[in-house]
Amino acid sequence: MDKEKCIKQLEQFRQRLYQNFNNRADTLMELVDAISSNRDARSVVEYSLSPCFRRSYSTIFKALAEMDWEELSLPRLLAGYLPQPEGRAFWLWGVDVTPQPRQFAPTLRDRSVVYQANPVSGNKPITIGHQYSTVALLPEAEAGVSSSWVVPLLTRRVHSDEDKELVGAGQIAALLTDEQLPYRKGLCVEVGDTSYSKPAYLCANRQHDNLVTITRVRGNRTFYRAFVAPDDGAMAAGHPTWYGAPFSLPDPTNWPEPDELLTRQERSRRGKVYRVEVRAWHNMLMSGQHKPARLPMHLHPFMLVQVVRYDEHGRLACKRPLWLLVIGPRRQALTLAAIYQAYGQRFDLEHFFRFGKQKLLLADCQTPEEVREESWWQLVHIAYAQLWLARHVAQSLPRPWERHLPAMKARQLSPALVQRDFGRIIRQIGTPAQPPQPRGISPGRPTGTKLPPRPRYQVVIKGRQLANSP
């Protein structure tokens, strides 16, 4: 790719980003650059020590408190720089929820018990804090660039009285209905984990004909074949029959022959060869629900896909098969290979969360104001998007002990390598932010001022909240 063109695109994005900051634009722009270039900060306030941040540390929290950012600002800013799908005929999105642990923040509003993975066996995978729903574009692989990149589009805090999956459905709907984005006319595919396979989420955006949803389903569920009327044409009186024979995932004896079968070979990074068998059953149905809202799932047939991997000796490489659900009016436009590859790319979103929390301090904003916390999450997503735009501009700077790693030899620029070189990029292209203008020493609070203590808030426990509701 033309490097000069990439530099010009990065400069143009930074100028437009600066213009979209309504309040304290100079401070926010320098803070985004500090996040993008400082790999050693251990807390948010340490970003004030970055060479590109020319203001005092107190301005960070003032800027976060006054930040005015629209939900669709980042997708609109990135719309002109997104690579068009070439190897596949659809846009691919990933949607997921990640926690913001705040166990020791009793003055923070709306904390609840949220899921967090726990590596210690026997401990409950929960924590106290907030959780955020993120939608990111999963781009195709590019030469010279690591395959783990994503393009963050939307992030939003999930309130304690909201359904986290339906928050993600609302974000997907916002992307599909915005006329300034390129998604309304093309085929769009979203991938999600098992929590997104419930009827409420699957029904949420079915009015969009160009959306196909791929979610993982648990191996203990039961689905149904579509009902087929008898050959003699005799129909029973009463309620119409929608569901046919049950399809129990844990019981292979009641599985009919698959409608499609795909066998392919894969080679892992360590050189091991695997045989992957992908089976599909068309026009499957799931049970609907009546409360809290009626969801007639018999109106939304889907494709059920099973993925089984075998090693070179013909033994199962995984203990359990992978079950996928593909729903949407245009699901037949996806091949089994495209479905398998699309869901496999969902794990890039996990890499994004890990990099954001380890290198960008995504979950380290310790503030008692939820507005500042939400603004911080927006800024970190903007900083990552800026790193993505600089992926073809940055230079690979491996450490002496990293020179012989396969990724370094292949010159595959990862987010960490781009962040390592982003300080040089800022010095080369400059910043639209204006330098600070000191105006003397502030008098501060009058002597003897006593601030009232902040109110304490109880942790919201949903089960207890529902039990106390009238």
Image (spheres, helix red, strand yellow):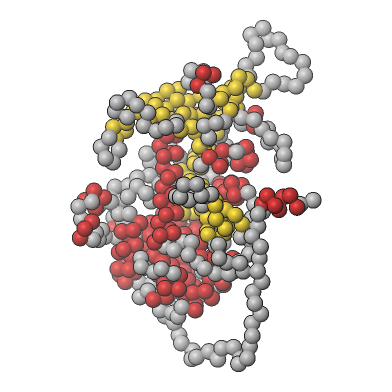
Residue that appears at 63% across and 88% down: 449
Q: Is residue 151 above or below residue 190?
A: below
Q: Where is residue 378 drawn, in percent x and y?
A: 51, 62
Residue 374 placement, left or right of 340: right
Q: Is residue 104 visible?
A: yes
Q: Is residue 358 above or below residue 119?
A: below
Query: Quarter-wise, where is residue 276 in the image?
Result: top left
Residue that appears at 60% across and 24% down: 224
Query: Quarter-wise, where is residue 231 in the image?
Result: top right
Residue projecting furthest to the front: 122
Depth check: 417 or 173 in front? 417
Depth check: 117 or 278 in front? 117
Q: Is residue 432 visible?
A: no
Residue 453 placement, left or right of 218: right
Depth check: 195 or 467 in front? 467
Residue projecting furthest to the top: 232
Residue projecting furthest to the right: 470
Q: Where is residue 312 drawn, in percent x and y?
A: 29, 28
Q: Where is residue 419 drawn, in percent x and y?
A: 34, 62
Residue that appears at 73% across and 49% down: 467
Residue that appears at 42% across and 23% down: 261
Image label count: 0
Residue 207 placement, left or right of 466: left
Q: Where is residue 417 drawn, in percent x and y?
A: 31, 59
Q: Is residue 16 above or below residue 171?
A: below
Query: Quarter-wise, where is residue 103 in the image?
Result: bottom right
